[in-house]
Amino acid sequence: MTAHPIRQPLLLGMMRLLDYPELAAPQALLGFVERCVERGLNGFDHADIYGLGECEARFGAALRLRPALRQRLELISKADIVPAAQDVSRWRVKHYDSSARYLTRAVEASLQRLGVERLDGFLLHRPDPLLQLDEVTRALQALVAAGKVGWLGLSNAEPLHWQVLGRELPLRCNQIELSLNAQQAAWDGRLQALQADGLQVLAWSPLAGGQFAAALQQALDEVAAALQATPTQVALAWLRCLPGQPVPILGSLRETRIDEALAGAELQLDAPTWFHLSEAARGMRAP
């Protein structure tokens, strides 16, 4: 496995793009993307199921207004989840599809919606229990060889998933849920295993959607006051202490929240503070 760390303080998640009516017009979204790039943020995290494809389509419509901007962006997308609404079988069931045919079509559809010739990164969105290793390997290698995908990664993968696939493919990252509310990977060795295997950790829902329990929110407020920071900045600093320095994927597209996160990008926590916050979140002391 080859490590290619993503060298920016955070990525911007496009899952909730449709929740921002102020970004609905292509010109408005283009302005937002340009301002992000000016801030040093050029990584945008997509998936084919976000808005059932509409999030990528809107992003592509904005990008078509200024095609030259493409060269300054890092576009990531994911596929293999089939929502029930898109299942054409009689069962109408959510399922995963990691077949070569599905993955190839998914990449080509994302390219068309985004209006680009290449995805910088492509991730398998969820581990598929029916995944056929040889078929997936050939499909992803072909996409890279054809220049449609720059690098490969996984999302929500457990150790055996990334280790088996990593024997056949040059994986760059694993995107996992990681926050004060979802910190098990910090305790069970997964983060050290990812670091040892050369995979960058991308942390989705790094602020747990703002759903912090009262005890944790109080601890964040107290630490923030002591460090002259904000609770959001402290929660993100907690992540940066972890092995491999996980890169948070910020779900909010509010520019004030983005500015707040960037302003605290250099904030450091010492070990006692890290454990204090962890204990407040878990409701239990370290073992």
Image (cartoon, rainbow, N blue to C red):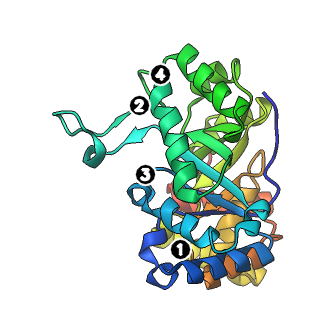
- Verify CB contact (< 8 Å) between mark 1 and mark 4: no
Question: Is label 1 or label 3 in front?
Answer: 3
Question: Is label 1 or label 4 in front?
Answer: 4
Sequence-wise, which precedes: disc 3 or disc 4? 3
Residue 97: assigned label: 2
Q: CA distance from mark 1 to mark 3?
A: 32 Å
**How crowded is the residue under tag 3: few (<14 C-alpha within 10 Å), some, or many (20+)?**
many
Q: CA distance from mark 3 to mark 4?
A: 19 Å
* Element marked by disc 4: loop
- Residue 192 appears left or right of 278: right
Q: What residue do we see at 64% from left, 54% from top?
A: 116
- Report which residue position mark 4 lands on: 131
* Element marked by disc 2: loop
- Report which residue position mark 3 lands on: 49
> Quadrant of the image for the N terminus?
top right
Sequence-wise, which precedes: disc 2 or disc 4? 2
**How crowded is the residue under tag 4: few (<14 C-alpha within 10 Å), some, or many (20+)?**
few
Residue 275: tell me if it is visible. Answer: no
Q: Which residue ends up furthest to the top in the rendered image?
A: 134
* Element marked by disc 1: helix
- Report which residue position mark 1 lands on: 217
Q: Amino acid at mark 4?
A: Leu
Sequence-wise, which precedes: disc 1 or disc 2? 2
Q: Give residue 253's position: percent from left, percent from top.
A: 57, 75
Q: Amino acid at mark 1?
A: Gln
